[in-house]
Amino acid sequence: MTEAGDNFTVVEYIPLPEGNPQKKSHPLKGAFYFLLGVLAYSIANVFIKTSSEYYPLGEMVILRGLIFLIPLTLYILILSSKNLSSVFSTPHLKIHGFQGIFSAFCLYFLFYAFEIMPLSDATAISFSETFIITLLSLFVFKEHIKFKNWIAITIGFIGVLIITAPFTTPFTFHIKASLACLLAVTFDAIVLLSFRTIVKKDRMLTILFYYALFSTLGGLLFTPFETWVPLGQDHIWDILGLGIFGALGQSFLALAFRQTSPAVLAPLIYTQLLWSLLFDDMIWNRLPSFSLILGSSIIIFSGIYLLKHTKK
């Protein structure tokens, strides 16, 4: 998920031509692309949940990465064949490696959350990434947090507690999945903040390639603890759907950000909860609980307040 989008989701891309953003803002066009991106990510999440019933999570991280890495590499080799060194050479290899490994952990914990809990619950909890990014910015970039924003962050995490209800139930799989979801968005927030250090120094294709490479290799860290399951014909479309819709999601987000400011689009990420609720009902016959409705409402209102009152 990026906060510019991915909720959470986990950050998938397809390569797009590099160029300068459009000078003229088109908010409606940007909102249209952004909403399409949110829908695509929501569909990818469905494939994650269905695939996790049959395949180890580490294997899914690797397969998802390969679906991204292979076409991206072919794209680079074909369109940048005369200037490959400008794409593959970078003085920031350690930072790219750090981002990729942390992204793999983000994906792993996210997949675990999707496997155990309803999509809508995991989606609502993932919105807490707004608060986590704000908190990390305080420690990493020494950014000042106003007292009102501290209140919004505190209220937002109260919303998370309402959804997870850790003090009213035993330490169940639902609570473990909630903790995994929080870990996932924490790893994702760290990755997003680390992009600040290289986004203006490396080419976008360089960033994308090493993200894809190291996040795929990061999935190998989990394989010693799992048994690899050969990909069955009945599940090929699930795995492909996971990667394709994730890529479409990031593609639409990239198009959206070329039309208008991320600050205008960011609140639209909360529409992902509507899709998650719909898919939970249609596919798994799960209706939202009162705690989900109350907790997610608190998280969303607190998140929108932060988005409107926090300096970039």
Image (cartoon, helix red, strand yellow):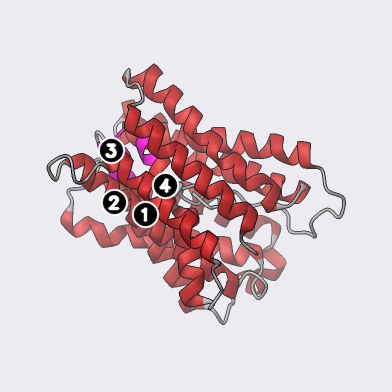
Which residue is depicted at the point 43% across and 50% down? 156
Point out residue 306 in the picture as x, y percentages from the top left corner: 56, 54
In this rendering, position of residue 236 left or right of residue 258: left
> 14 above or below 142?
above
Residue at image mark 1: 184
Mark pair 2, 1: CA separation: 6 Å
Q: Is residue 307 visible?
A: yes
The amino acid marked with disc number 4 is Ser
**Numbered tag placed on residue 115 in the rendering:** 3
- Return the residue nearer the eye: 228 or 295: 295
Point out residue 94 in the picture as x, y percentages from the top left corner: 46, 78
Which residue is depicted at the point 49% across and 76% down? 140
Q: Secondary structure at mark 4?
A: helix
- Return the residue nearer the eye: 20 or 229: 20
Q: Is residue 121 magenta?
A: yes
- Return the residue nearer the eye: 66 or 293: 293
Few, some or many residues within 10 Å of mark 4 (<14, 14–19, 20+): many
Point out residue 9 in the picture as x, y percentages from the top left corner: 46, 47
Q: Earlier in the sequence, mark 3 or mark 1?
A: 3
Residue at image mark 4: 126
The amino acid marked with disc number 3 is Glu
Point out residue 80 in the picture as x, y percentages from the top left corner: 69, 62
Q: Earlier in the sequence, mark 4 or mark 2?
A: 4
Q: Earlier in the sequence, mark 1 or mark 4?
A: 4
Mark pair 3, 4: CA separation: 15 Å
**Numbered tag placed on residue 215 in the rendering:** none
**Is the residue under label 4 in contact with that under label 1 (CB below 8 Å)?**
yes
